[in-house]
Amino acid sequence: MSESAKNRGRPNPALVIMRRELGSYFNSPIAYIVTGLFLIITGIMFFTAFFLQNRASMRNLFSLLPVLLSFFIPALTMRLYSEEKKSGSIETLMTLPVTEFDVAAGKFLAAFISSAAMLAPTLLYLAGICLFGRPDAGPVAGGYIGALFLCAAFSAVGVFASSITKNQIIAFFTAFIICIVLTMIGEFLIFLPAPVVGFLQFLSAGEHFTSISRGIIDTRDLLYFISLTALFFSLTVMAQKKELD
């Protein structure tokens, strides 16, 4: 049998690692604690707008979603590499027929799916709005599309932060600081000189997410999130190659 035929019969290493990470995550209490806290906070924001402000809208939720994901996604990703580095099992994993790319891809996919699963129950809020009002489909669809791209980018940041330390707390705060700076950088533009504003607006994840959440799907915003995801994914692979050399 040829080598290519043998390879076609083997499961993809990245998918195997992804399934392992998802199984480990959803069999631990942290999955339900993090998701529960996220839903409590988003629920409060939604019902405040729905009942107190009498608005059948998801605008409140989407406006604060980048800040919330800046905190909750690092909580999901902090253990992905750090736990294995601390226990020493990462060396055992790398002796298997896998590459640094396979491991990073598997862990990134697990992080992205976990963050998307955390976001999925908020669709129940949308169902409630549809029962009592007529939400504008464009901003709602844009908000969820933007949220998925944001989840991908912040998952890549979180995986990178976890890949450079054995300490989960350090991994969490490193990812949180990067994510919150990317989110909030656009809030301080009024204090800066005009030539700097355009550059910082381009760097701001919050600005790009806000643009998409208005229902305006601009390829520049999508390319920003794709580039940010690819950058931190590449940094993760490079960090692992350097460590193992």
Image (cartoon, rainbow, N blue to C red):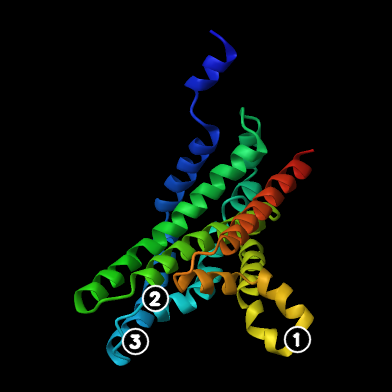
Q: Nearer the viewer, mark 1 or mark 2?
A: 1
Residue 43 percent across, percent down from the top left: 34, 77
Say which element carries label 3: helix
In three-dimensional space, the C-alpha distance between marks 1 and 3, rounded to whole angstroms, equals 34 Å
Label 3 CA crowd tier, 10 Å (few <14, some 14–19, many 20+): some
Q: Which mark is residue 54?
A: none
Say which of 9 and 215 sits in front: 215
Q: Along the polypeptide, which appears first: circle 2 or circle 3?
A: 2
Q: Nearer the viewer, mark 1 or mark 3?
A: 1
Residue 63 percent across, percent down from the top left: 47, 79
Look at the image and tell me whether residue 166 can be seen. Answer: no
- The residue depicted at 61 percent of the width and 54 percent of the height is 159
Q: Along the polypeptide, which appears first: circle 1 or circle 3?
A: 3
Q: Which mark is residue 192?
A: 1
Residue 235 percent across, percent down from the top left: 71, 51
Which residue matches tag 3? 48
In three-dimensional space, the C-alpha distance between marks 2 and 3, rounded to whole angstroms, equals 10 Å
Count of picture labels:
3
Whether residues under marks 2 and 3 lie with C-beta atoms below 8 angstroms apart, the answer is: no
The answer to whether 52 appears left or right of 225 in the picture is left
Q: Quadrant of residue 241?
A: top right
Which image quarter holds the C terminus? top right
- The residue depicted at 54 percent of the width and 43 percent of the height is 106
Say which element carries label 1: loop
Whether residues under marks 1 and 3 lie with C-beta atoms below 8 angstroms apart, the answer is: no
Residue 48 percent across, percent down from the top left: 34, 86
Q: Which mark is residue 42?
A: 2
Q: Quadrant of residue 188?
A: bottom right
Label 1 CA crowd tier, 10 Å (few <14, some 14–19, many 20+): few
Say which element carries label 2: helix
Look at the image and tell me whether residue 182 can be seen. Answer: yes
In the rendered image, the vertical position of residue 105 relative to residue 73, given as above or below: above
